[in-house]
Amino acid sequence: LQGDWSSDVCSSDLLNISLDMIFRYKTVRELAAAITGPARQALVSTSPFSLISEDDRLALPGDAEDAYGLSRLQAGMVFERQIHPGSAIYHDIFSFQVRMPLDRAALERAVAELVLRHPMLRTSFQLEGFSEPLQIVHRSAAPPITFEDLRGLSSPEQRDSVARWMEEEKRRGFDYSNPPLLRFRAHETSPDSF
């Protein structure tokens, strides 16, 4: 694989990654450690804000802990979503049934810890106002979590209710300039599952 991975890496600085390496190394950290070539130093030695200009850094919000340019793929995804705002393109919804009583406070704490632990869950996209479109990692982001009690409905009614919510959710967009770019919802289906 070859690519221009950052503004600090010129097109002649290639990352030497074989297909075999992608399957051999199970995490990005392991793969990064195994990469060779002139671009390796740029890959492993970036510090916060090192991939943006000083002017852009001075214009960042006060809660920014890092910032870097959007990848071409991300820019394309944002472009497609803006062209088709009512579509579900690039809006993934995952549903899991958990067999245990719903403890709302514990779930709220777990989601908040998840967002705090993973910088990408605290990232916003700023498409204007900088020399290039940026991803900004914020120090914190309040993850929205909502709850719906479906225990009074039959199993088919519960499935229909969740399916309707999922269809409505697909059409709800995100404000890319405000993190987090994810939402959580718990549908309580019985005293022992959600």
Image: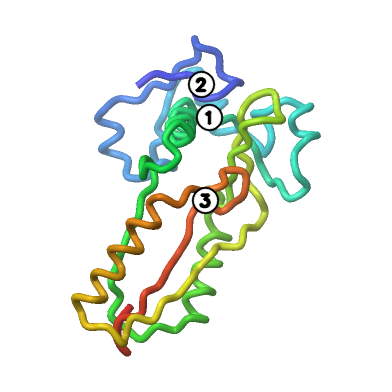
Label 2 packing within 10 angstroms: few (<14), some (14-19), many (20+): many
Mark 2 or mark 3: name the one nearer the start of the chain. Answer: 2
Which numbered marker is on residue 39? 2
Q: Which residue is mark 3?
A: 181
Q: Position of residue 135 (x, y in %)?
A: 59, 38
Image marks 2 and 1: residues in contact by CB distance under 8 Å: yes
Where residue 165 sits, quadrant-wise, is bottom left
> Please, what is the three-letter code of the amino acid marked with disc 1?
Leu
187 or 74, nearer to the observer: 187
80 or 140, nearer to the observer: 80
Viewer-side label of 2, 3: 3
Question: Which residue sits furthest left?
Answer: 156
Distance in Å between CA atoms under marks 2 and 1: 6 Å
Image marks 2 and 3: residues in contact by CB distance under 8 Å: no
Quarter the N terminus occupies = top left
Q: Residue at x 38, y 52 (%)?
A: 170
Which numbered marker is on residue 43? 1
Question: Which residue sits furthest bottom?
Answer: 191
Q: Residue at x 40, y 33 (%)?
A: 34
Quarter the C terminus occupies = bottom left
Considering the numbered disc 2 on the image, is that residue within a helix, a strand or a loop? loop
Query: Compared to 13, does 77 lie above or below?
Result: below
> Please, what is the three-letter code of the amino acid marked with disc 3?
Leu
Colour scheme employed for the rendering of this structure? rainbow
Q: Residue at x 67, y 54 (%)?
A: 139
Considering the numbered disc 3 on the image, is that residue within a helix, a strand or a loop? loop
- Is residue 151 in sight in this rendering? yes
> Please, what is the three-letter code of the amino acid marked with disc 2?
Ala
Distance in Å between CA atoms under marks 2 and 3: 31 Å
Q: Is residue 94 left or right of residue 143?
A: left
Distance in Å between CA atoms under marks 3 and 1: 26 Å
